[in-house]
Image (tube, rainbow, N blue to C red):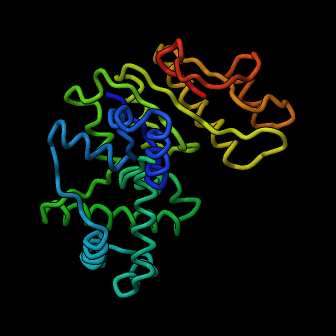
Amino acid sequence: RVYVLCPDQATYRVTKRMVDVLGNQSAQKVDVIDFRGLLERFYSRCGHRVEQVSEAAKLLLFSAAMIDSRASLRTSDLLAGTHDISILESLVSAVDMLSACDIDSSVLAKIASDTEEENPMLAGKLRDIGCIWDTYAALAEASNVEAASTLQLLSRWIGRDGFLDHTVWYVVDYNDLTTQQHGILNQIISLSDKVVVDLHCAGLSDTRDSSRLAVRTGQKISMYCAENDIPVEATRTGDISTDAQPLRYMQEWLCDTSVAKPADFSPKGRIALY
């Protein structure tokens, strides 16, 4: 099985490109998906489907969690969130971002403990968020819905039931990955037959964040492969200018010094970075 993993907004463009290059019949053998689609493919092949909490239900459950936790809260603005939708939405957004970075309420509690003496106000707010978060999780469980995000579920299940056996992966248009996305990709790298990661690092005088993020992402993947004795091949493609800091960095840390060449997507190693 061959998968192309790309952001949701790129799936149509990538699918169209696949059809243009490979033809309709061959393109049908390639599954173009984002992380949400990847979870759906896992459900289809391996089961374990759960009902995830919807965005609307999440707001309602967090609102109920704030009310239930009110007696324990110390932070006035969080107390106001029981009747202020903007505060509630900000809290939910913050929890989603923390989850994407593999931070949960237990981590918040530890940070709060470490910063109590230096910044008691921050420590109090972190404890309040953790309290509301734990109450939300308990309410979701009592309502028979899964509070975990798509990425959390993928992190939990992607390596199970032989789903990644005999698969080939092309990862495109992800110059930057969250901690959880990196964890999922690491499992794919460890358990699949081959992985090709295409990272866009612009040349010449371009020092945009996208180039820096591409370098950082490639470096993290290379470090993971090195730590786990996984063969990796990094190939520069496109601009060979040494004027661009991102390209110099990419060349020094990831790639050999050969002349840049078009990618043929037939790497000698099992993991390839382009």
Question: Where residue 74 sits in the image (x, y, percent)?
Answer: 41, 75
Q: Can residue 110 be seen in this view?
A: no
Q: Tell me which residue sits at (25%, 71%) in the image.
A: 57
**Drawn side of residue 171 relative to residue 204, left or right:** left
Q: Tell me which residue sits at (26%, 66%) in the image.
A: 54
Q: Is residue 255 above or below residue 249?
A: above
Q: Tell me which residue sits at (17%, 57%) in the image.
A: 51
Q: Can residue 140 be seen in this view?
A: yes
**Drawn side of residue 62 relative to residue 264, left or right:** left
Q: Which of 239 and 43 is in front in this view?
A: 239
State the quadrant of the N terminus: top left
Question: Where residue 26 sits in the image (x, y, percent)?
Answer: 37, 31
Q: In which quarter of the image is residue 248?
A: top right
Q: Which of 173 and 64 is in front in this view?
A: 173
Q: Is residue 112 above or below residue 32?
A: below
State the quadrant of the C terminus: top right
